[in-house]
Image (tube, grey):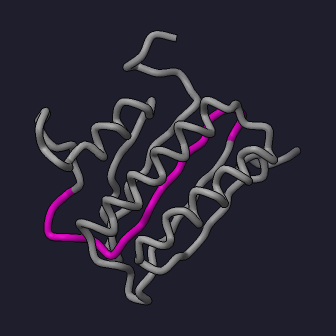
């Protein structure tokens, strides 16, 4: 009998805490999810969400002690969970208030609109922001 963990396929990357890492992570995520046969809509949404989570970590948080960010994603059945771990910041990640003319501040609002679940886990070594995609949505009609 297979364990639950063996049914869940996990990928992890550590990348420098630099803007140049974002397209590399997006490319790796899309290639992996495509190879696994994940639905195209879920791949597209995961690509947007991982880019937003990375951008937020780069803009608002410190890197991990080695100067990197940890990116992890897992696939179980049709659900994809993505997460970004950074070295933490002075504030807890949360969606910014709605502002039509603001030049930034929409990242977590985008994540919240695409994910059926998302959250923040604060740990001793840093902060992990995660989102689940491709499953039942409480926010959108299916």
Height in image: 76 above or below 13?
above
Residue in front for this viewpoint, 99 or 134: 99
Please state the horizontal and vertical placement of residue 126, each as a whole percent of the image.
33, 72
Which quadrant holds residue 135?
top right
Please state the horizontal and vertical placement of residue 54, each as a whole percent of the image.
41, 61
- Asked if residue 15 is among those painted magenta in the image, a careful observer would answer no
Which quadrant holds residue 88?
bottom left
Height in image: 28 above or below 38?
below
Residue furthest toward the bottom?
66
Left or right of 13: which side holds 32?
A: right
Residue in front for this viewpoint, 20 or 62: 20
Left or right of 139: which side holds 95?
A: left
Please state the horizontal and vertical placement of residue 89, each as a whole percent of the image.
21, 70
The residue lying at 61 percent from left, 29 percent from top is 41
Quarter of the picture containing the N terminus is top right
Height in image: 117 above or below 72?
above
Which quadrant holds residue 51?
bottom left
The residue lying at 41 percent from left, 77 percent from top is 17
- Asked if residue 82 is among those painted magenta in the image, a careful observer would answer yes
The residue lying at 54 percent from left, 43 percent from top is 46
Tell me where the magenta segment starts and ends, as one range: 76-92
């Amino acid at each position: 009998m297979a364990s639950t963990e063996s049914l869940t396929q996990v990928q992890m990357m550590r990348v420098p805490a630099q803007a140049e890492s974002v397209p590399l992570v997006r490319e790796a995520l899309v290639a992996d999810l495509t190879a696994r046969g994940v639905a195209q809509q879920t791949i597209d949404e995961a690509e947007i969400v991982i880019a937003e989570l990375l951008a937020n970590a780069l803009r608002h948080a410190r890197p991990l002690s080695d100067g990197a960010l940890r990116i992890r994603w897992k696939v179980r059945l049709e659900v994809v969970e993505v997460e970004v771990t950074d070295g933490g910041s002075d504030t807890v990640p949360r969606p910014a208030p709605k502002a039509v003319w603001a030049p930034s501040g929409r990242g977590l609002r985008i994540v919240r609109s695409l994910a059926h679940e998302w959250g923040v886990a604060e740990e001793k070594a840093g902060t992990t922001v995660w989102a689940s995609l491709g499953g039942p949505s409480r926010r959108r009609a299916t």
